[in-house]
Image (spheres, rainbow, N blue to C red):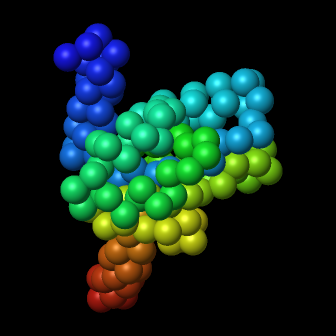
Amino acid sequence: MKEAQKQKQLIIDEIKDKFERAESAVVIDYIGITVAEADSMRKKLREADVDYTVYKNTLVKRAIAGTEYEALSEVLEGPSGLAFSFTDATAPARVLNESIKEFKKMEFKGGVVEGEVYNKEDIQAIASIPSREVLISKFMGSIQSPIANFARVVSQIAEQKEA
């Protein structure tokens, strides 16, 4: 095998591994952003523990050929950036959506969330789902409120009986 082919195979194997381990992968068209905007976006993605890489479409297509992600091949035209999250299924879409709104550039092409392939409209909808931590805190707040109210009522009843 020639050196160039070995290098390509290493990249294909890397892409396959990322897809297999990822909770989600989002494909964006990143055309039109400046280097500074790209750096800002990458920083936000890193802070959210999201792996963002630009690969050649042909290598991504080879990596996903014959897998459950093969349907993504349809969106792999033109400049494509891939954002992978291995812990939070909504993080790539959510963070990229913030950058899309901020820079008024780029757009979703599609993605995979928990093994299911989605088009750009579906990824846009997924981007509006709050992070796991936000959902948990909202849930905890919603169950804490009735408990606190119940405790106050019991306390008031106890105080009335003492009087």
Tell me if I can see residue 23 in this picture.
no
Which residue does the image show at 72% across and 24% down from the upper left?
Answer: 35
Tell me if I can see residue 70 in this picture.
yes
Looking at the image, how many numbered discs can be counted on the residues?
0
Q: Quadrant of the N terminus?
A: top left
**Closer-to-camera residue (43/116):** 116
Which residue does the image show at 51% across and 58% down from the upper left?
Answer: 75
**Closer-to-camera residue (41/80):** 80
**Closer-to-camera residue (50/18):** 18
Which residue does the image show at 55% across and 65% down from the upper left?
Answer: 120
- Residue 46 is situated, as x and y percent measured from the top left of the image, at 48, 30
Outermost residue, front side: 2
Which residue does the image show at 79% across and 50% down from the upper left?
Answer: 104
Q: Quadrant of the C terminus?
A: bottom left
- Residue 118 is situated, as x and y percent measured from the top left of the image, at 43, 68
Residue 94, by quadrant, is bottom right
Q: Is residue 60 above or below residue 122?
A: above
Residue 3, by quadrant, is top left
- Residue 132 is situated, as x and y percent measured from the top left of the image, at 38, 57
Horizontally, residue 149 falls left or right of residue 37, namely: left
Horizontally, residue 144 falls left or right of residue 13, namely: right
